[in-house]
Image (cartoon, rainbow, N blue to C red):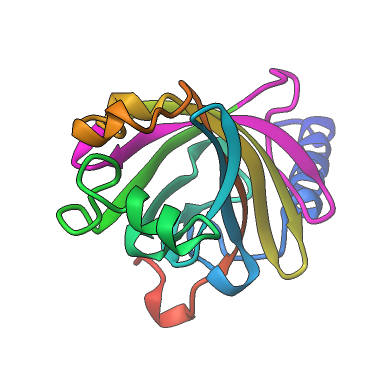
C-alpha cells in the first residue's frame, strides 16, 4: 500500500469515526420510554370522527446508528388500556365484535427493517440528524397478523432516539367491526395511528453479547 493510499484510508476512517453517533454502543439493545412516548389513533364511527389513545405499551429492539436500516423492534400494546375518551365508547370498543380485549389483551408490532424514503439518504445517522424511512413489519391484532408499512421520521439527540409518524390500515382485516353489533355501529375503512416514540440504550447488563 502506498503512503498516499494509506493516508486516504486513514482519512476515511477518521471521517467515519467522527460521524458515528455517540448515543449508544453499536448494535445496542434499546428500550422504549413509555412515559416520554404517546400512541393515539383517529377513526370514524357512524360517520363521526373520533380520537382515542393507548395508555400502556412497551418495546425494545436492536439499533445501530451506523446501520439504521437494520433496526429491529418489537412493541407490545396493552389493549385493556384502550381509551376513547368516553367510558361507554371505550367499553363498546373493548367488546368481542371489536377489539375483544378479554380474549386478546395484547396487540404487537414487529419491525423488520427501515427503508430510506430518499435512496440518497442512506448511511449512518448522528445526533442532530433527522431522516425519513418506510418502516416495514407485521402488526398483530385479535390474533391476526398482517404486513404493515408506514412512514417514520427517525431523529437522534444526546438523550436517545425518537421515531414519529402516522400509520393507516383497514381495521376490518383484523376482524375489528365484525359481529351483531356491527349492524348498529359502522367504522370507516381506515384507522390512523399517530405515534411519537422515544427510546434509549438499555442498561449495560441487558446488552446483547
Q: Position of residue 17 (x, y in %)?
A: 74, 53
Outermost residue, left side? 103
Q: How many marks?
A: 0
The vertical placement of 47 against 162, above or below, is above
Q: Inspect this view and state whether residue 135 appears.
A: no
Q: Is residue 75 visible?
A: yes
**Left of 8 or right of it: where is 72?**
left
Give the position of the C terminus as an image quadrant: bottom left
Q: Tell me where residue 3 appears, x and y as whole percent.
A: 81, 36
Quick one: quadrant of the N terminus? top right
Query: Nearest the camera: 36 or 6?
Result: 36
Q: Residue at x 67, y 65 (%)?
A: 160
Above or below, 119 against 201 in this view is above
Q: Is residue 20 above or below residue 34?
A: above
Of residues 158 and 199, the one nearer the viewer is 199
Q: Nearer the viewer, residue 47 or 196?
A: 47
Q: Is residue 85 above or below residue 6?
A: below
Quadrant hosting residue 2: top right
Answer left or right for 174 relative to 163.
left
Q: Residue at x 42, y 24 (%)?
A: 170
The residue segment tinted magenta is: 116-145
Viewer-side residue, 35 vs 80: 80
Q: Residue furthest front?
A: 184
For this orientation, the residue located farthest to the top is 119
> Does the segment drawn in magenta span residue 67?
no
x 79%, y 43%: residue: 130
Residue 153: x and y, percent? 70, 40
Amino acid at each position: 500500500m502506498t503512503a498516499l493510499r494509506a493516508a486516504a484510508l486513514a482519512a476515511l476512517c477518521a471521517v467515519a469515526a467522527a460521524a458515528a453517533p455517540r448515543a449508544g454502543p453499536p448494535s445496542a439493545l434499546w428500550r422504549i420510554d413509555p412515559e416520554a412516548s404517546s400512541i393515539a389513533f383517529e377513526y370514524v364511527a357512524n360517520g363521526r370522527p373520533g380520537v382515542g389513545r393507548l395508555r400502556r405499551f412497551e418495546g425494545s429492539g436492536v439499533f445501530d446508528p451506523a446501520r439504521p436500516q437494520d433496526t429491529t423492534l418489537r412493541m407490545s400494546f396493552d389493549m385493556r388500556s384502550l381509551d376513547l375518551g368516553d367510558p361507554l365508547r371505550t367499553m363498546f370498543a373493548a367488546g368481542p365484535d371489536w377489539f375483544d380485549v378479554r380474549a386478546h389483551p395484547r396487540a404487537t408490532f414487529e419491525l423488520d427493517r427501515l427503508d430510506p424514503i430518499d435512496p440518497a439518504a442512506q448511511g449512518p445517522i448522528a445526533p442532530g440528524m433527522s431522516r425519513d424511512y418506510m418502516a416495514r413489519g407485521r402488526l398483530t391484532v385479535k390474533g391476526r397478523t398482517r404486513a404493515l408499512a408506514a412512514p417514520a421520521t427517525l431523529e437522534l439527540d444526546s438523550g436517545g432516539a425518537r421515531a414519529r409518524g402516522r400509520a393507516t390500515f383497514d381495521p376490518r382485516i383484523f376482524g375489528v367491526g365484525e359481529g351483531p353489533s356491527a349492524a348498529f355501529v359502522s367504522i370507516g375503512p381506515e384507522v390512523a395511528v399517530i405515534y411519537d416514540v422515544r427510546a434509549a440504550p438499555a442498561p449495560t447488563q441487558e446488552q446483547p453479547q
